[in-house]
Amino acid sequence: MAGKVFVSGGSGYIAGFLIRQLIAEGWEINTTIRNLAREAEVRGWLGVDNSKLHFFAADLVSDSGWAQAMAGCSHVAHVASPLPADKPLHEDELIVPAREGALRALRFAKAAGVKRFVMTSSVAAISYGHKGQTVFTEADWTDINSPDAYAYVKSKTIAERAARDWVAAEGEGMEFCTVNPSLVVGPLMAPDFSTSLESVKKLLEGSIPGLPRLGFGLVDVRDVADLHVKCLTAPGMAGERFIASGPFLWMEDMAAILRNGLGAQGRKVPKRRLPSWLMRILANFDPLVKQVVSELDNVRDNDASHAKAVLGWETRTAEESILDAARDMLRLGVVKL
Ligand code: NAP
């Protein structure tokens, strides 16, 4: 089965690997970027058969361009959503484009006769606001009223809920499902990388003085792309929700992987643990520390057994993903030792 897939946000990290895999499997792609002046740059990273890839200008917060970009597409992967490194001035900077973008993509998809719609949500929509719980499944939903639900977490939860509500009310004839990744790492196509690779970058360049007790479920960008492709093509996906995650690792574990795997190139990776009591004191003086303090000592282990059982999805090891990210950062000059 191959036809034309609409992928929103062709300049993004996950979208790039998804576009590559889809084109390798025989699909043609319509993708969006906010500014067509970036088309040549993005084509350069992707390195795919250019005749199979078409760019359209579209923004999550405007109707312009969406109808043209969806025309002739039977499948949609709605991947674009804001994922900034810094805290926004107001949470609506993330919530509005995330929610409005998802609804806009759904409306235009229905009008274009799209049959299958896969939305990139996040474990951010699953695992926040449940104090004491450490393992999460697709049955869990983030409580956006909880104090640990920061702007990005709210944006992903609100967008996924709004999309599911819209599909229940108006989505007849279109199968909808979500992929909910944890922290995405792995190889880079270009020096313009996703915020999710910041922790690997900071460890590699030694720009943090030690290792706070912060942990993440990690997943490889190639495995996330592959799960999207499975969701686009497998039968019976209506209403499905799939966590895309590998193991939960503390920063200490990530640092050990970098040091053991990189030899001399891992020389700046910190070794010292930063105790959580010290981090809590530092948070009074350092806004960056303040941003992460509510995450200290939290275990959010996302169980991806549903995707494995239903779709035969498999993941690379965390070692491979972290070391591929680090080696590409060195190769592309993102980190200079
Ligand atoms: P990314 O590299 O930052 O890509 C985000 C994409 O969204 C970019 O193409 C960006 O376009 C686009 N975008 C943002 N605001 C937009 C707007 N107002 N209008 C149009 N496009 C807009 O991030 P990513 O890691 O690939 O993330 C992609 C998706 O995966 C997002 O939905 C994110 O929430 C989700 N996700 C990511 C992770 C992770 O760890 N990376 C984990 C879970 C879920 P520009 O290039 O123009 O900014």
Image: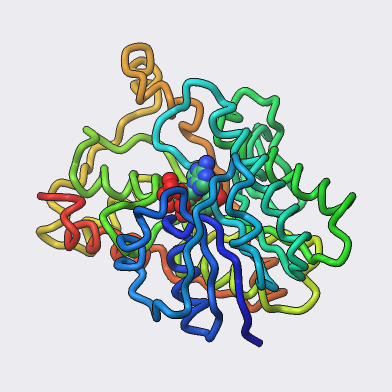
Asked whether, in this view, residue 202 is left or right of residue 330, the answer is: right
- Residue 235: % across, % down: 77, 79
Q: How is the image coloured?
A: rainbow
Asked whether, in this view, residue 184 is left or right of residue 178, the answer is: left
- Can see residue 249? no
94 or 319, nearer to the observer: 94
Q: Quadrant of residue 120?
A: bottom right
- Residue 314: % across, % down: 55, 74
Q: Residue visible at 77% across and 51% down?
A: 139
Asked whether, in this view, residue 322 is left or right of residue 271, the answer is: right
How many numbered discs, if any? 0
Q: Residue visible at 56% across and 63% down?
A: 7
236 or 7, nearer to the observer: 7
49 or 304, nearer to the observer: 49
Picture layout, residue 158 above or below residue 5: above
- Can see residue 123? yes
User: Could you tell me which quadrant the N terminus lies in?
Assistant: bottom right
Q: Residue visible at 48% across and 69% down?
A: 54
- Residue 194: % across, % down: 39, 50
- Residue 116: % across, % down: 73, 69
Picture layout, residue 169 above or below residue 207: below
Q: Quadrant of residue 211?
A: top left
